[in-house]
Amino acid sequence: MNLHVINTGFFKLDGGAMFGVVPKSIWQKTNPPDERNLCNWAMRCLLVEEGNTLMLIDNGLGDKQDEKFFSHYFLNGNDSLEHSLSRAGFSTSDITDMFLSHLHFDHCGGGIKKEGDKLIPTFSKATYWSNEEHWQWATKPNAREKASFLKENILPIQESGQLKFINEKEGHSNLFHFMDIFYASGHTDKMMIPKIRYKSYTICFMADLLPSVGHIPLPYVMGYDTRPLITLEEKAAFLNEAADNQYILFLEHDPVNECCTVQRTEKGVRLDKTFALKDIL
């Protein structure tokens, strides 16, 4: 197995929204905001090369939205999905499986592109993987999440015929023998957290269960989460398991740190080490 970090750029979100009830005087120590109270966040994806499978986990925000949209989110940085894939030696047509942790725009927007007036899959030969419960949640959104579920990112996947669902009850070992999936419903319904078996490690793609190292303490829950008390329970269970088993946590949104490990302390689970993924490859 080979793993590749695919950086798709940075975007900005309100610091208060990203840390919920935690006061700015505390969260700004780890994530300093700009003069507009915005913090910069990565959109860091993971490419898994295993046998005949080339699976990309999440794909960033994309570039098809209009100027008004980007004026809210301030896409920045020199990286892009296509350039990062090229640096790893691949193109969008090489991807066999597009695994979507969930369908918020900053995780799936790069999966659909504009070609003239048409919206088509960026990965022409890939199967796009979601799960039925989350798909229903995303295509019939509640008022709180509606701005995050953009139909132009989602519906063309189904219309292309490339969409398939992972069935939680039936399991997925016959699909991807190299990973397990943790389902989390605090942030959004049935978000999928891949746990990849690599050599002697378990590498967990944390999506929005743990956006950054600044979110490790349990109360540090995003204001975007639909069920914050459930997020508390899910974080506690996952981070304790990660500490006990020395999981490597791959951080999709941390602007600085690619990976970390955590440890148990008298104050609860806390940060242990941070490092780049290449340090273990």
Image (cartoon, rainbow, N blue to C red):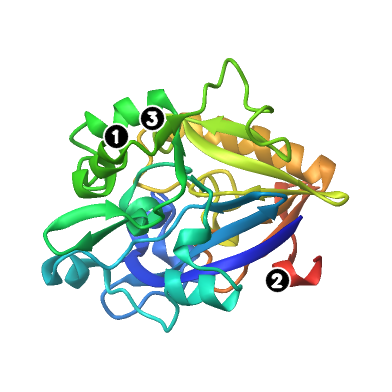
Asked whether the beta carbons under mark 2 and mark 1 sit within 8 Å of each other, the answer is no
Residue 114 image-quadrant placement? bottom left
Crowd class of label 3 (few under 14; some 14 to 19; many from 20; radius 10 Å): many
**Foreground of the two, 54 or 204:** 54
Q: How many marks?
A: 3
Residue furthest right as drawn = 200
Q: Which residue is mark 1?
A: 138
Q: Secondary structure at mark 1?
A: helix
Residue 42 point in image, percent of width and height: 47, 68
Mark carried by residue 134? 3
Asked whether the beta carbons under mark 3 and mark 2 sit within 8 Å of each other, the answer is no
**Foreground of the two, 228 or 13:** 13
Mark carried by residue 156? none
For residue 66, side relative to residue 129 (left or right): left
Q: Can residue 251 be seen in the rendering of this structure? A: no
Disc 3 or 2, which lies upstream in sequence?
3
**Label 1 is placed on what type of residue?**
Ala
Asked whether the beta carbons under mark 1 and mark 3 sit within 8 Å of each other, the answer is yes
Mark carried by residue 276? 2
The residue positioned 24% from the left and 32% from the top of the image is 139
Q: Secondary structure at mark 2?
A: loop
For residue 174, side relative to residue 13 (left or right): right
**Label 3 is placed on what type of residue?**
His
For residue 248, side relative to residue 148 (left or right): right
Residue 169 image-quadrant placement? top right
Crowd class of label 2 (few under 14; some 14 to 19; many from 20; radius 10 Å): some
Crowd class of label 1 (few under 14; some 14 to 19; many from 20; radius 10 Å): many
> What is the spatial separation of the Cα atoms under label 2 and label 1, in whole angstroms?
32 Å
Q: Secondary structure at mark 3?
A: helix
> What is the spatial separation of the Cα atoms under label 3 and label 2, in whole angstroms?
31 Å
The residue positioned 21% from the left and 53% from the top of the image is 119
